Image: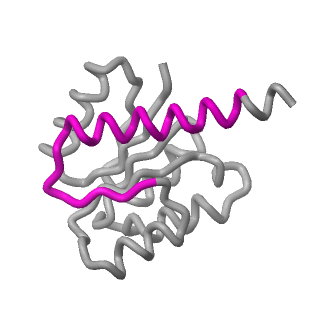
Amino acid sequence: MPTIMLAEDEPQTAQLIQFKLKQAGFTVVHAPDGEQALTLVAATRPDMIILDGLMPVFDGFEVLRRIKEDPRHRHIPVLMLTARSRDKDVVSGLELGAADYMVKPFSPTELLARVRKILGSVAGKEAGEAAR
């Protein structure tokens, strides 16, 4: 199953998301702040990233910017999951390269559906490229 890196500084939220993803069969690695998130991305090369917008050290928007600027990691889809709900925040996240953007509070069922959709899109894209 795919590996998902979760960058979330709120312990209860991180535990809930990890539980739901593991229950669905995903491997999950967790980073409690933006600096550790960047380190884990390089170390684990996850299939997808779920990224909180408000974290210590580097916020999620800075982490997203750095991931998308790095040729080794820019292909990894990122789902922003944050309390930052203003239109300008959503637009900023999408313009920086997020595959999707969800606002907290969130439905764990909806989060799982979006994760599956993003990973399905990536798998389909990779299969299409391999067929060429």
Q: Residue at x 21, y 35 (%)?
A: 109
User: Which is nearer the eye, 45 or 77?
Assistant: 77
Task: Kindly identify the residue that appears in the image at 64 percent across and 54 percent down.
Answer: 74
Tell me where the magenta segment starts and ends, as one range.
100-127
Q: Is the magenta stretch mostly helix, strand or loop?
A: helix
* Viewer-nearest residue: 57 or 45: 45
Q: Horizontally, is 110 left or right of 45 in the view?
A: left
Q: Does the magenta stretch include residue 32?
A: no
Q: Position of residue 15 (x, y in %)?
A: 19, 36
Q: Where is residue 71 shown, x and y percent of the image?
A: 73, 55
Number of numbered discs on residues: 0
Direction from residue 67 to residue 26 in the image, left or right: left
Residue 128 screen position, x and y as percent: 74, 31
Residue at image point 30% right, 23% down: 22
**Residue 4 location, x and y as percent?**
44, 35
Color encoding of the figure: one colour
Q: Which residue lies furthest to the right in this view?
A: 132
Question: Based on the displayed image, in which of its 4 quarters is residue 49 positioned?
Answer: top left
> Eyeballing the image, is 124 above or below 59?
above
**Quarter of the image where the C terminus is located:** top right
Q: Is residue 103 magenta?
A: yes
| Placement of 12 over or under 65, stated as above or below | above
Q: Residue furthest bottom?
A: 88
Residue 65, placed above or below residue 1: below
Direction from residue 125 to residue 80 in the image, left or right: left
Side of 53 where 108 appears, left or right: left
| On screen, residue 32 above or below 124 | below
Which residue is drawn at the image coordinates 82% and 25% (left, top)? 131
